[in-house]
């Protein structure tokens, strides 16, 4: 039975491939015929309504934050252009309409129709939310996208946000982050004892397990806190944003990798009732803009990070240093303990993390025989 299904699907696949390659071999004229045929059978996009909508987007980001807040504004621009002006979105940075960390509640209650942030900010509302942002020693950007879009993650995300009258979707990714800026060397795990570090989320809980003191200060205060010794270390994002923050002037050591945020997902969350009341084409336009922002932000980070890591080392004498292997190993063990504690206390976290960790295990197995060896080979 299974064998015959397999051979049926193989036949179907081969048949499709043959059709495609025939079209490709025939060249431009075949492609043009296919296109013009398509044009005849489909009319202009169905405009279901001429009603116009004016929405508000609140974000958790500083109003001028490069790439991330830029991307939030681009979502609004793209939606307006794609909808021919039928859906206009006014974007507010953190604190402009509501404080950054109240964006979730504001959209849930309909004060604003949508928001841009990252799901780990809402772990106080639902601990399961943070698994849709960043998990220490979790998955990178490409793998997070694969889990959410194609591996069942989105259904679980919908389930976690449903009690809040929200839906959410990936709408940006920072890519791999850096381990942070330290004013002393980290030679063993005991160097974390008593270390005051600005590090949010699950990473902060891991630092606490290692004997450190995790603090959470707003972006604007980190530099001064580090300069004055209020904190001994900080993480932020990656080389580009860290460069703009000027941390190289007040801390000597720049550690990698960002074990705590291997590919942080940024999200567009939308009031569910308001979303469902939109015509279907506008719903698709929002989803399409989020997809585009997801790829655009990651591409911007990837493109600017490698240039700026060079700048930091060559122009500012930053000591770029890897965490020792045994430090990473111990941090990984602590991360597993932190996650165990969360999932044992919350059924939904357990359900989400079961899906996350199962996906991670198999996709890391695939990475082992694809990218991992390849990176070593081209080094
Ligand atoms: Ca970070």
Image (spheres, rainbow, N blue to C red):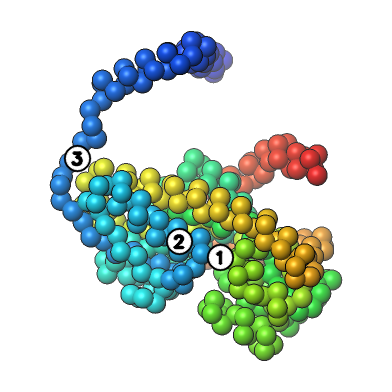
Residue situated furthest right in the rendering: 187
Q: Which mark is residue 15?
A: none
CA neighbours of label 1 inside 10 A, class few (<14), some (14 to 19), many (20+): some
Q: Is residue 279 left or right of residue 172?
A: left
Q: Which mark is residue 342?
A: 1
Q: Return the disc, 3 or 1, that comes first in the chain's sequence.
A: 3
Question: At numbered mark 2, what does the secondary structure look like: helix, strand or loop?
Answer: helix
Q: Nearer the viewer, mark 3 or mark 1?
A: 3
Question: At numbered mark 1, what does the secondary structure look like: helix, strand or loop?
Answer: helix
| Above or below for 285 versus 181 | above
Q: Position of residue 91 (x, y in %)?
A: 35, 65
Give the camera-side residue of 262 and 183. Answer: 183
Does the beta carbon of the residue at mark 2 sit less than 8 Å from ligand 1?
no
Q: Is residue 358 left or right of residue 114?
A: right
Q: Return the disc, 2 or 3, that comes first in the chain's sequence.
A: 3
Q: Position of residue 50 (x, y in %)?
A: 15, 47
Disc 2 + disc 3, Cβ < 8 Å? no
Say which residue label 2 marks. Answer: 70
Q: Return the disc, 2 or 1, that comes first in the chain's sequence.
A: 2
CA neighbours of label 2 inside 10 A, class few (<14), some (14 to 19), many (20+): some
Q: Give the tally of numbered discs.
A: 3
Q: Mark 2 and mark 1: span between their CA atoms?
A: 34 Å
| Above or below for 223 versus 236 | below
Say which residue label 3 marks. Answer: 47
Q: Position of residue 21 (x, y in %)?
A: 52, 14
Question: At numbered mark 3, what does the secondary structure look like: helix, strand or loop?
Answer: loop
Q: Nearer the viewer, mark 2 or mark 3?
A: 2
Write the residue at 39% across / 60% down.
Answer: 73
Disc 2 + disc 1, Cβ < 8 Å? no
Q: Position of residue 61 (x, y in %)?
A: 46, 69
């Amino acid at each position: 039975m299974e064998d015959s299904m397999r051979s049926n699907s193989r036949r179907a696949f081969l048949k499709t491939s043959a059709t495609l390659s025939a079209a490709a071999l025939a060249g431009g004229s075949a492609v043009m015929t296919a296109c013009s045929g398509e044009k005849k059978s489909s009319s202009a996009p169905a405009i279901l309504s001429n009603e116009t909508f004016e929405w508000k987007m609140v974000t958790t980001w500083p109003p001028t934050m490069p790439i991330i807040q830029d991307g939030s504004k681009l979502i609004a621009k793209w939606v307006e252009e794609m909808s021919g002006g039928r859906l206009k979105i006014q974007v507010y940075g953190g604190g402009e309409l509501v404080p950054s960390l109240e964006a979730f509640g504001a959209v849930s209650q309909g004060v604003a129709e949508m928001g841009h942030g990252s799901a780990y900010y809402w772990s106080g509302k639902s601990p399961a939310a943070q698994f849709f942002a960043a998990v220490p020693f979790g998955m990178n950007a490409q793998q997070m996208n694969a889990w959410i879009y194609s591996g069942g993650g989105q259904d679980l995300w919908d389930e976690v946000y449903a009690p809040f009258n929200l839906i959410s979707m990936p709408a940006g990714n920072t890519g791999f982050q850096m381990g942070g800026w330290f004013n002393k060397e980290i030679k063993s795990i005991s160097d974390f004892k008593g270390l005051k570090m600005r590090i949010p989320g699950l990473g902060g809980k891991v630092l606490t397990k290692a004997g450190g003191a995790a603090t959470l200060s707003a972006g604007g205060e980190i530099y001064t806190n580090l300069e004055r010794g209020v904190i001994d270390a900080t993480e932020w994002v990656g080389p580009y944003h860290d460069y703009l923050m000027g941390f190289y002037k007040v801390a000597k050591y720049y550690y990698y990798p960002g074990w705590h945020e291997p590919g942080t997902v940024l999200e567009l969350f939308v009031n569910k009732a308001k979303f469902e009341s939109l015509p279907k084409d506008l719903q698709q336009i929002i989803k399409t803009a989020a997809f585009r922002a997801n790829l655009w932000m990651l591409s911007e980070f990837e493109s600017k990070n490698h240039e700026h890591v060079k700048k930091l080392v060559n122009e500012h004498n930053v000591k770029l240093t890897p965490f020792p292997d045994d430090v990473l190993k111990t941090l990984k063990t602590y991360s597993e303990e932190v996650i165990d504690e969360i999932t044992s206390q919350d059924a939904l976290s357990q359900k989400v993390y079961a899906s996350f960790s199962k996906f991670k295990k198999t996709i890391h197995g695939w990475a082992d025989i694809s990218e991992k060896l390849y990176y070593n080979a081209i080094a």
